[in-house]
Amino acid sequence: MSEIDNVKHALNEWLDGLDSGDLERMVKTVDPDAVLCNQHQPTGYGIQAVREKYGPRIEAASFRSGFDIEHIKVYDGFAVIIGHFTVEATDKASRRKNAGQGRLLLVYRKHADGWKMIVDIDNNDDKS
C-alpha cells in the first residue's frame, strides 16, 4: 500500500468510526498534539478535545458522513488533505435529521503505528 493509501485509510477509519458511533476508533487516528480549528467553535487541543467534541454528539445522534478528496500530498513525515465533507446527523431521541457540508483541511503526521490527524480546519457552506 502506498503512503497516500495509508493516509486515506486513516481518514476512512475516522469516518467509519463516526458513522458507527465508535469514538475510540476515531481517537486512534488522532495525534496527541492535534489542533481542531472548527468554524464557530473554540480551538481544541489534543485527544481530549476530540473526546469532548464528539463524545456527546455520538451519544445524541447517529451519523452518515462523506468526504471527497480534492487534493492529497505526502511530504516527509506529514500529509495534507483538502476536500469537501458532507454529514447527516439523526437525533436518536426525536429522529430529527440535520445535515451539513463544507470544506476541510486535514494534516496528518506519520507515527510508527500509522498516520494520525494533527490539524483539522473546516468551514461550513453557508445556507442562504
Image (tube, helix red, strand yellow):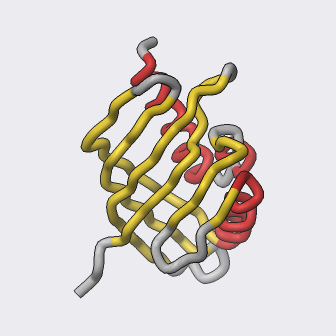
- Image coordinates of residue 16 in percent, x first then y, are 55, 43
Residue farthest to the bottom, as pictured = 128
Question: Left or right of 26: which side holds 84?
Answer: left
Pick whichever, 94 or 50, lies toward us. Answer: 50
Left of 54 or right of it: where is 40? left
Instruction: Give the image location of residue 42, x and y in percent.
Output: 60, 75
Q: At x 33% / y 60%, what residue is drawn?
A: 103
Q: Which residue occupies the foreground of this view, 67 or 104?
A: 104
In which quadrant of the rendered image does the C terminus lie? bottom left
Image height of 19 relative to 16, above or below? below
* Picture layout, residue 54 above or below residue 94: above
Lateral position of residue 112 relative to residue 88, left or right: right
Residue at position x 44%, y 33% in the image: 79
Q: Residue furthest top?
A: 1
> Which quadrant of the figure has residue 5?
top left
Residue nearer the viewer, 6 or 37:
37
